[in-house]
């Protein structure tokens, strides 16, 4: 159990367009979802934490108007990169935690590789 | 902030045990240690976690020192598919991990 699905796996877009990434918990209800970005040969950098029905909490230095997060249900969170530019090119990964025992274990999606031309 | 220190890289022969150390000397009394691994270009995968007792599951064993300032992840019989970056995490702070290469 504890499968997290992330789509799309890869996106190539033109500069100035917006890109939406979906993160779904398939077999459990996610109390909290997290969004990370990862540059080549670097570690995961937490961008924001979201709870269903409330506003996301963004990490310092992450622009909330640039990276819109919507957590509409206990199984779905979306990240929209607005007006993407080449410097936004990165590997974006979501994760989810669930209620109950081991609730702080993060289950990760497969990631989305965004390339902005 | 709790922070972990891991060697940047390690090698292991296929079939042998891989022992991956982690230093977390600033860990607080009620904080867990979590281990994940990331195979190239994929999302991280949860391996195991512990508080103060040693833990074992189908993937690995976790040995935590009595003072809780360090731990060791043990893959008892490493395979080529265990080649990955292994992260030791406290309080959701991600370092650079250890890049483990399992060699035939």
Image (cartoon, coloured by chain):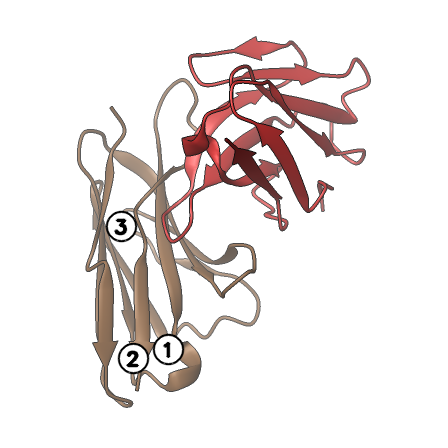
Chain colours: A brown, B red
Q: Nearer the viewer, residue B45 or A104?
A: B45
Distance, label 3 to label 1, CA atoms, is 20 Å
Residue A104 appears in the figure: no
Rendered residue at 64%/28% (across/down): B31
| Residue B32 in the image, given as x and y percentages of width and height | 61, 26
Q: Which residue is mark 3?
A: A53
Number of callouts: 3
Q: Are marks 2 and 1 on the same chain?
A: yes
Q: Are marks 2 and 3 in contact (CB under 8 Å)?
A: no
Q: Which residue is mark 1?
A: A66
Q: Quadrant of the C terminus of chain A?
A: bottom left
Compared with B95, A48 (above or below) is below
Q: Nearer the viewer, residue B9 or A14?
A: B9
Mark 2 vs mark 3: which is more N-terminal? 3
Distance, label 2 to label 1, CA atoms, is 5 Å
Rendered image: mark on residue B58: none
């Amino acid at each position: 159990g504890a499968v997290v699905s992330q789509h799309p796996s890869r996106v190539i877009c033109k500069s100035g367009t917006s890109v939406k990434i979906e993160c779904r918990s398939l077999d459990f209800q996610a109390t909290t979802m997290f969004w990370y970005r990862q540059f080549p040969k670097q570690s995961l950098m937490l961008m924001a934490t979201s709870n269903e029905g409330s506003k996301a909490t963004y990490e310092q230095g992450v622009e909330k108007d640039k990276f819109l997060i919507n957590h509409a249900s206990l199984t779905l969170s979306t990240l929209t990169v607005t007006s993407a530019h080449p410097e936004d090119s990165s590997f974006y990964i979501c994760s989810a935690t669930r209620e109950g025992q081991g609730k702080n274990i993060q289950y990760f999606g497969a990631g989305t590789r965004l390339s902005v031309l | 902030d709790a922070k972990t220190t891991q060697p940047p890289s390690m090698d292991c022969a296929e079939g042998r045990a891989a022992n991956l150390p982690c230093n977390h000397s600033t860990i607080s009394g009620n904080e867990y240690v979590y281990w994940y691994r990331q195979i190239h270009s994929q999302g991280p995968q949860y391996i195991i976690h512990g508080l103060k007792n040693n833990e074992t599951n189908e993937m690995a064993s976790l040995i935590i020192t009595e003072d809780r300032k360090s731990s060791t992840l043990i893959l008892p019989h490493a395979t080529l598919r265990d080649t990955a970056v292994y992260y030791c995490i406290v309080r959701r702070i991600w370092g650079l991990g250890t890049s483990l290469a399992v060699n035939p």
